Image (cartoon, coloured by chain):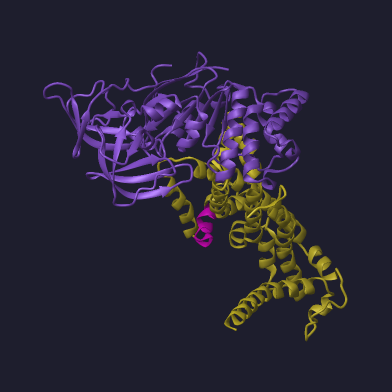
């Protein structure tokens, strides 16, 4: 058990900056997800923690130890790889017990720990098999069992579910989350799948271009994205972004959006001028007729999805996704009126693409 | 119809190729295991009639044969040790590490094959005379190492390239150092490939005749010995000699094949 701290980590490959001055603190026992598109540096950051990459700057602290220059075997970490990296020439039993044997653990203890790890992952009946005789899902379980069998401070997972098919991935996601809650080990989990990140993590650190853009609870990252990248990367569909203008000439500030306008309330920190209005599809209500504070839109497509309908509507030039009850079926090309839930509007600066009033780049706070 | 024809052509071609390889081997083996008189028979017998080790015994008891046979084994073993001892680390480095000039190095290795041993042997003979290792097992095996090393490096490099780096990294997170991760994970997984490289190296040395002939006088290897007396030797001697050149290659290939293709309950390549 230990907390983890990245201090100003920097890693370059030739001229490419993979990790650019990253600070992140993961408290003891927390499950933190590093989320980002491919090439954002999330795996590199994880490998810096594992000691598989040498950092070009900054410090890695595990517990209160400075692990920056320690080889992987001294860091008391365990890692689950994307390819599982199960040793093909060893039986499942020897795979799971490998770390224990390297630490010269007594035979009886190895046996006991291997069996209890196998039991947790429901693979006791596979202990005598070779990896080639296992399915992908079973190999995945062996890899996790191997990682938890050795006593460790931190568990690292690099896209462990991405090689499984969709149904199995959903099953494993829930099972893995339950298992990790039970173990209570500090876990850092890398994924590009935002559903995985939101559903599993205590905290999600969103990365883009080598930096951590936002590190917060899944709900906060979803509801209050720090910038347009986070809003657009997280959520299905992604957050809608509309160009708008805030004017304050005489009295209460108003928002102009295409042909419509409505009063600005709760627009903390928004300065007059051009702004970007960010809103989630489910934070938009649909009205059949013009009311005060509504915005006119034209229906483009209706997609029934069972639990809800997804409308694509046009406001001026912009296309907007709106989530409605499954019984709302407007005719394509017909007009309707939208009401944005004021509290769920996220105001963005079109120049910096960052949210107004957003806290300083997160991750600095523990 | 054309599919049947294609199939027929394919199998016909394969059969021809197989016969092209197998028939000479068969005739050599047949002659080696018959009596010296039967070797002169014409027309040839297609099935062995009277199997006898007389021809082989005659060959082995000929002057210089047993000594050269033993030397051949020694030279091949030394070549094997040199080639894999130097070639395996080089192959591993080529497969695992990005370093300046890696590609140039790779090409340089292949380009050493552009110098035929015919050209290399004369200066080598001169140099070996100066060093005092002419006409010795060490000298011949050094020349053979020069021949076999490029193959050893390239084959082992592709073997290691086929083993995921993540396996070694996983071992390192589980308590291994760089070295123990190599010894416990990469090396055992590379064994079938390394065995193939070893067989190949052994046979390159076993069958090499030119450098061996030039670099030795008294201490000849088997091919050099057979070549030296070929003109004056009777037909049974030649067949028996041919069989001895063939046999190790065949035995080694058949024995190791099983190991090569079936390891850890799975088919490798």
Q: Is residue A60 visible?
A: no
Q: Which chain is purple?
A: A
Q: Quadrant of the C terminus of chain B?
A: bottom right
Q: Nearer the viewer, residue B123 or B265?
A: B265
Looking at this view, name the residue that lies furthest to the left: A250
| Numbered marks: total | 0
Q: Nearer the viewer, residue B249 or A86?
A: A86
Residue B189 in the image, given as x and y percentages of width and height: 64, 44
Q: Which residue corresponds to the image point at 19% horizontal and 28% vertical from the top-left?
A: A254
In the rendered image, the vertical position of residue A163 relative to residue A185, given as above or below: below
Q: Which of A8 and B146 is in front in this view?
A: A8
Residue A165 in the image, given as x and y percentages of width and height: 56, 46
> In the displayed structure, does residue A242 sit left or right of residue B155?
left
Residue A348 in the image, given as x and y percentages of width and height: 26, 30
Residue A73 in the image, given as x and y percentages of width and height: 58, 25
Q: In which quarter of the image is the N terminus of chain B?
A: bottom right
Which of the 4 image quadrants contains residue A40? Answer: top left
Which of the 4 image quadrants contains residue A245? Answer: top left
Q: Which residue corresponds to the image point at 65% horizontal and 76% vertical from the top-left?
A: B11
Q: Which of B174 and A356 is in front in this view?
A: A356
In the rendered image, the vertical position of residue A143 relative to residue A219, given as above or below: below
Which secondary structure class fits the magenta region best? helix
Q: Which residue corresponds to the image point at 58% horizontal and 44% vertical from the top-left?
A: A167
Q: Is residue A201 visible?
A: yes
Please say whether residue B124 is one of the residues in the magenta stretch: yes
Looking at this view, name the residue that lies furthest to the bottom: B43
- In the rendered structure, which segment of residues is drawn in magenta? B116-126
Looking at this view, name the residue that lies furthest to the top: A64
> In the displayed structure, does residue A162 sit left or right of residue A299?
right
Q: The yellow chain is which one?
A: B
Please say whether residue B139 is one of the residues in the magenta stretch: no
């Amino acid at each position: 058990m230990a907390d983890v701290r990245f201090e100003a980590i920097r890693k370059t490959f030739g001229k490419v900056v993979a990790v650019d001055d990253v600070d992140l603190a993961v408290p003891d026992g927390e499950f933190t997800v590093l989320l980002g598109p491919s090439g954002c540096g999330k795996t590199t950051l994880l490998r810096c923690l594992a000691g598989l990459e040498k950092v070009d700057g900054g410090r890695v602290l595990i517990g209160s130890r400075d692990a920056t220059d320690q080889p992987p075997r001294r860091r008391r970490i365990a890692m689950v790889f994307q390819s599982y990296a199960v040793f093909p020439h060893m039986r499942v039993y020897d795979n799971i017990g490998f770390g224990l044997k390297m630490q010269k653990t007594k035979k009886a203890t190895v046996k006991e720990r291997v069996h209890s790890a196998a039991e947790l992952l429901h693979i006791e009946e596979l202990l005598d098999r070779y990896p080639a005789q296992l399915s992908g899902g079973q190999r995945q379980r062996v890899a996790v069992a191997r990682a938890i069998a050795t006593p460790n401070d931190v568990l690292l997972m690099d896209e462990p579910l991405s090689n499984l098919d969709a149904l199995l991935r959903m099953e494993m996601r829930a099972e893995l989350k339950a298992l990790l809650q039970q173990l209570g080990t500090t876990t850092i989990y890398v994924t590009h799948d935002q559903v995985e990140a939101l559903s599993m993590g205590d905290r999600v650190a969103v990365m883009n271009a080598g930096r951590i853009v936002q590190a917060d609870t899944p709900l906060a990252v979803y509801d209050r994205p720090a910038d347009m990248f986070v809003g657009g990367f997280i959520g299905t569909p992604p957050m809608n972004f509309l160009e708008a203008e805030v004017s304050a000439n005489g009295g209460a500030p108003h928002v102009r959006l295409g042909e419509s306008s409505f009063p600005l309330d709760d627009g903390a920190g928004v300065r007059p001028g051009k702004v970007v209005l960010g809103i989630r599809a489910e934070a938009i209500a649909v009205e059949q007729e013009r009311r005060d504070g509504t915005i006119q839109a034209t229906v483009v497509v209706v997609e029934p999805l069972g639990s809800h309908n997804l409308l694509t509507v046009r406001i001026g030039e912009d296309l907007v996704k709106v989530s409605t009850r499954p019984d709302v079926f407007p005719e394509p090309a017909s007009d309707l009126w939208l009401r944005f839930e004021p509290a769920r509007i996220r105001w963005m600066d079109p120049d910096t693409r960052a949210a107004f009033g957003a806290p300083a780049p997160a991750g600095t706070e523990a | 119809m054309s599919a049947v024809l294609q199939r027929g052509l394919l199998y016909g071609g394969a059969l021809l190729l197989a016969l092209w390889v197998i028939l000479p081997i068969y005739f050599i083996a047949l002659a080696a295991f018959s009596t010296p008189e039967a070797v002169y028979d014409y027309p040839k017998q297609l099935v062995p009639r009277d199997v006898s080790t007389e021809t082989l015994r005659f060959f082995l008891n000929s002057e210089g044969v047993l000594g050269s046979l033993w030397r051949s084994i020694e030279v091949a073993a030394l070549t094997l040790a040199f080639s894999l001892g130097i070639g395996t680390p080089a192959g591993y480095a080529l497969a695992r590490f990005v370093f300046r000039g890696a590609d140039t190095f790779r090409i340089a290795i292949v380009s050493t094959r552009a110098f035929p041993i015919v050209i290399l042997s004369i200066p080598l003979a001169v140099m070996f005379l100066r060093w005092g290792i002419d006409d010795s097992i060490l000298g011949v095996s050094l020349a053979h190492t020069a021949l076999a090393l490029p193959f050893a490096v390239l084959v082992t490099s592709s073997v290691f390239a086929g083993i995921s780096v993540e396996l070694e990294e996983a071992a390192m997170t589980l308590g291994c150092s760089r070295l123990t991760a190599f010894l416990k994970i990469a090396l055992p997984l590379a064994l079938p490939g390394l065995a193939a490289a070893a067989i190949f190296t052994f046979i390159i040395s076993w069958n090499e005749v030119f450098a061996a002939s030039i670099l030795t006088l008294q201490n000849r290897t088997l091919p050099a010995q057979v070549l030296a007396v070929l003109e004056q030797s009777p037909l049974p001697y030649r067949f028996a000699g041919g069989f001895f050149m063939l046999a190790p290659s065949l035995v080694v290939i058949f024995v190791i094949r099983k190991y090569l293709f079936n390891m850890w309950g799975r088919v490798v390549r």
